[in-house]
Amino acid sequence: MKRAISLIAIAAFLLLAGKTQAQGLGINIGFAPQSTTNFTPQEMNGFFAGVNYNHALSNNIGLSFGGQVRYNMKKSTTTVLSASETTTYTQILVDVPVLFNFAIPFGNDVRLAIFAGPVLSYALKGNTNISENLLNTSTDFNWYGEKSNYNQFDLLGAVGVSLRYQTFRLFGGYRMGLLDINKSDKVKSTTSGIFVGLGFVL
């Protein structure tokens, strides 16, 4: 397990977006909410930051690889009279995409590209915190503890489009989980979500 984390961490040095159209290193940030079937919470807001490198296979075809650190979270509060309970869900993941892209140039400054490929994803942390104001209590639940039913590893498929103007890139798409991350034979859990981001090509 430590070796797998190390490999992902090394790949994360190259961090995601994987949607470039010309050879070079890209820095990316964006919004990537996540939906998970048969899981609490089912919906979380997500944000990512990372880098990617696009290797030109031909004038219009490239192979992008890299990684990203993704942070998911959701907070909800229930209040009854003067008592309130706040539940906070947090998750930190590392994604490693390997994406093929096909670009169509429009002059020297503008390039439109489509991209698709697999994304390896590994959850470094998943936690539920429940705090109560009257008794001033706080309890944490580890999603990936010894008795957990959830796998930390996931494989996703990603598709999308990218528009680049000079050194700036706007991209977006959809990712879909290809694996059942629930260890139970009776329950199936998969992840999915859109993503939009802004990149800068060095």
Image (spheres, rainbow, N blue to C red):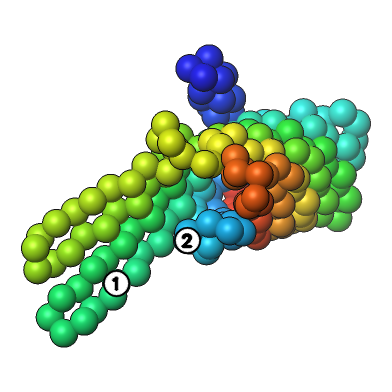
Which disc is residue 77 wearing? 1
Q: Position of residue 184 (x, y in %)?
A: 60, 44
Q: Is residue 51 rendered to the left or right of residue 165?
A: left
Pick the front one: 180 or 120 = 180
Pick the front one: 200 or 182 = 182
- Amino acid type indicated by mark 2: Pro
Which disc is residue 41 wearing? 2
Q: Secondary structure at mark 1?
A: strand
Q: Position of residue 2 (x, y in %)?
A: 48, 17
Q: Residue furthest front?
A: 186
Q: What residue sits 33% from the left and 58% below the top?
A: 88
- Amino acid type indicated by mark 1: Thr
Which disc is residue 6 wearing? none
Quadrant of the rendering where the C terminus is positioned? top right
Q: Position of residue 76 (x, y in %)?
A: 34, 69
Instruction: Residue 161: name its quadrant.
Output: bottom right
Q: Earlier in the sequence, mark 1 or mark 2?
A: 2
Instruction: Residue 134: name its quadrant.
Output: bottom left
Q: Residue furthest left?
A: 135
Mark 2, other Cα within 10 Å: few <14 / some 14–19 / many ≥20: some
Q: What residue sits 82% from the left and 51% below the top?
A: 114
Pick the front one: 146 or 27 = 146
